[in-house]
Amino acid sequence: MLISAQDRRIDASMMQLINCTNQTMKLILSSLATIGLVMTLLVNAAMAIDPAAVATEAATNTVCPISGKPVDPAITAEYEGRKWSFAKEACKTKWLKSREESLYQKLGGKPAMEAAVDAFYVKVLADNRVKHFFDNVSMDKQRRKQKEFLSAAFGGPLPWTGKDMRKAHEGMGLTEEHFNAIAENLVNTLKDLKIKQELIDQVVAVALTTKDDVLGRPKKAN
C-alpha cells in the first residue's frame, strides 16, 4: 500500500505530539519527585531540628536556623510576629529568600493558612463521604494541627513536630475515595479564596506526596 505525502505529514505531526506529551509528563513527574523529596527532607528536618533554632512568640531563637551556630543578637528579622536571629548577615539573607520563594508565602502566609483551614473544615464536615471520621475529634485541636502541618509542608518557618502522616492515619480504614474527597474539598476551598490555579496545582502536588502514607500503602523503594 502506498503512503501519500499527506499521510506522512500527519504521522510526523502525531510523533511530534507524542514526543511533546512525553516530555511534559517527564517534567510533571520530575516536579512531583522533587516535591516528594522536599516533603521527606521536611519531616527529617523537623525530627532533628534544635528547638533553640526556632523563634517563639515570646522569645527569639538562640541558635541560627541556617548555620546552626550561636546567633549574633544584632542580626535579626521580624516575620509574622516572631523575632528571628542569625549568626551572620548572609544567613539572614538566605533565610529571608527562602521565605519569599516558599509556597507558604505565595499563598499568603499565616492569615491564608488560618482562613483556608477554617473554610476547608466547613466543607469537610458537610461532606457525607468523610465527615464521620471527625465525629469524636476535637475540631479546635484538629484545625490547629492542620494549620501547623500545612504551614510547614508549604515552606513556612516553623517545623512540623507532630506525628508523621502514616502514624497519624493508621487504622482509620481510609480509601482512595476518602483521599479524593479531602483533596476535592481542599481544591474547592482554595478556589473559593481566589488562589491562583498555578499555586493550587502546587498544593495538590504536595498533597499527593502524602497519599501512600495516609492510605497506609507499602512504602515505595527509592
Image: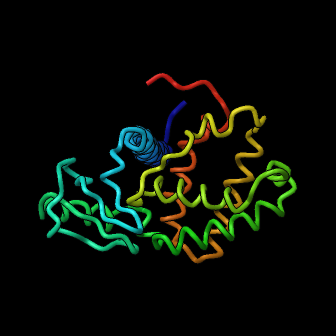
Q: Position of residue 11 (x, y in %)?
A: 48, 42
Image-based side of 104 in relation to 49, left or right: right
Q: Quadrant of the C terminus?
A: top left
Residue located at (53% from left, 72% from top): 112
Q: Residue furthest front?
A: 58
Image-based side of 189 in relation to 35, left or right: right
187 or 148, which is in the foreground?
148
Image-based side of 184 in relation to 127, left or right: left
Location of residue 45 with respect to 79 vertically, above or below: above
- Figure disc tally: 0
Res 222 seen here: yes
Q: Position of residue 211 (x, y in %)?
A: 61, 40
Name the image quarter holding residue 80: bottom left
Q: Position of residue 101 (x, y in %)?
A: 33, 64
Q: Quadrant of the N terminus?
A: top right
Coloring basis for residues: rainbow
Residue located at (76% from left, 68% from top): 122
Location of residue 63 with respect to 188 vertically, above or below: above
Q: Position of residue 97 (x, y in %)?
A: 25, 64
Location of residue 169 with respect to 192 vertically, above or below: above
Residue located at (49% from left, 70% from top): 110
Location of residue 164 with respect to 75 vertically, above or below: above
20 or 62, which is in the foreground?
62
123 or 167, which is in the foreground?
167
Residue located at (73% from left, 40% from top): 176
141 or 184, which is in the foreground?
141
Res 26 seen here: no
